[in-house]
Amino acid sequence: MNTGSLTNSSAYRRMALIRRFEEQCLELGREGHVAGSVHLCLGQEAIPVGAVAGLQPQDRVLSTYRGHGWALAAGSDPLALLAEIAQRAAGVNGGRAGSPLLSDPEVGFLGENSIIGAGVPIADGVALASKAQGTNRVVLTSIGDGAMNQGSTTEGMIFALARRLPVIFLCENNGWAEMTPTVETIKHEHVAQRAQGIGIESHLVDGGDPFAVEAAVRAAAETCRRGEGPVFLECKTVRLSGHYNKDVQHYRPEGDADDARAADPLTRYADQDRLSKAEIDALDESVFEEIARIAAEVRAMPAPDPATAHDHVYDLDHQVADLARAVEPAKDLAYLRAINAALKEALEERPEVLVYGEDVAFAGGIFGVTRGLQKTFGADRVFDTPIAEAAILGSAVGAAMEGMRPVVEIMWADFVFVALDQIINQASNVRYVSRSKPRHRSRSGCSRASRPARARSTRRASRRS
């Protein structure tokens, strides 16, 4: 993670690098080198630059689908990142993710998410792993203002508060929920009022000032490290471009676009006299030359080899315990008692195993499957959750990505469909997109499991009464 306090020069250069990188993405798209939609963070560069500077090397970041700037701020190689967006073999994900799903776990960037709000429960799971492993790690997940209307966002915030997880929810409020003005769907003056209403410590931040963002994130991270998280930060910002690369913005009033340009963070920075004009010109020229060189290399890169398309679907190297070992003396058990015995054995033998869900801890589950486990293994490893299926399954994805082995119960089979996104769009993609890359090793010496794990769930084939 590319952390450390900003200087006047480093702040401007990092913002300018993101700006020119995004502009180059548009150019490559027009040339036909980028397939599909690309969502740019033009106008929002100060937020990832400031936020990552306020974190520590062992921390984790997840972002919205406007995540190119977050990846660059975290320390991703610009060449590999641009190659990924152009879906080249040398991309950070080997061309598998393109723009919408890119990730770089080796620098602590756990990825973008093209499903609005879906990264919030996953961030909870990453933070849950941090607590279980004692890493003193904080997790920051960015969302847009439109994501405040997603159920998974609310579930994730409630889950994090219930468990006092070290998560920073950072809302990049640019005033637009895709192509709809936010004021048409959110009637609060500030979206932070929703988080505040849940009971989460919340703050408003000038998202056009990287130093203001850095200070706010550093303070929020300290709160989380004290065990007093989560924290919600609403960063007021602007969107200088359309919702995606081919958006002509026919719906946008001219006055709104003018106001956004007037609040351009790079222009603001230059007007504040933090650097001389000569210094800014030199930094701009340096960035322009770097990105031009990178783009030229990307244009010449080959596409991925089709023969590798099926690689990393399965973890063929993972060592599984011998499931056929003899148990003496053999005996017949009722199915539910057998599950209870298996969970007890897993908790005894594997410290990375967690068991949680609705009513599974103190009550032992409505069928008694988890009865007695919390009493034996404690409330840190076997615990109850809010009634929030998206948060339960999403947190299991995040915890498994960090090397834990969560076993989560969805009380009735019908309820799985409430959170099917976390199984189909999230859990199923992690290994494939990341190419089984190891988690980031921080300078503090903390390390992650060598491969992301699979979350497992127990399900009940009955209906809610």
Image (spheres, rainbow, N blue to C red):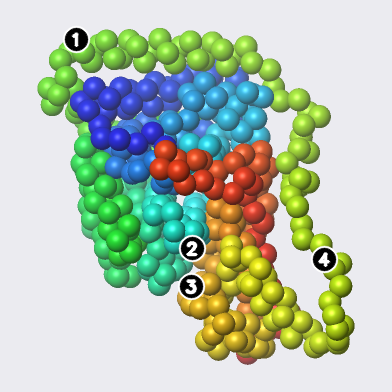
Position of residue 321 measured from the top left corner of the image (x, y, whole percent): 77, 61
Q: Residue at left 51%, top 65%?
A: 391
Q: Is residue 434 left or right of residue 2?
A: right
Circle 1 sits on which residue? 278
Q: Amino acid at mark 1?
A: Ala
**In the picture shown, does residue 405 fall above or below 302?**
below
Q: Is residue 413 left or right of residue 113?
A: right
* Of marks 4 and 1, the one in the foreground: 4
Crowdedness near tag 1: few (<14), some (14–19) or many (≥20) residues, C-alpha within 10 Å: few
Mark 4 and 3 residues: CB-CB less than 8 Å, in contact?
A: no
Farthest residue to the left: give it.
273
Q: Which mark is residue 132?
A: 2
* Of marks 1 and 2, the one in the foreground: 2
Q: How many marks?
A: 4
Q: Amino acid at mark 2?
A: Ala
Mark 1 and 2 residues: CB-CB less than 8 Å, in contact?
A: no
What element does badge 4 sit on? Answer: loop
What element does badge 3 sit on? Answer: loop
The Cα atoms of the two marked residues, 4 and 1, are separated by 68 Å
Circle 4 sits on which residue? 323
Q: Which mark is residue 380?
A: 3
Mark 3 and 2 residues: CB-CB less than 8 Å, in contact?
A: yes
Between 445 and 250, the residue placed more toward the observer is: 445
The Cα atoms of the two marked residues, 3 and 1, are separated by 56 Å
The Cα atoms of the two marked residues, 4 and 2, are separated by 26 Å
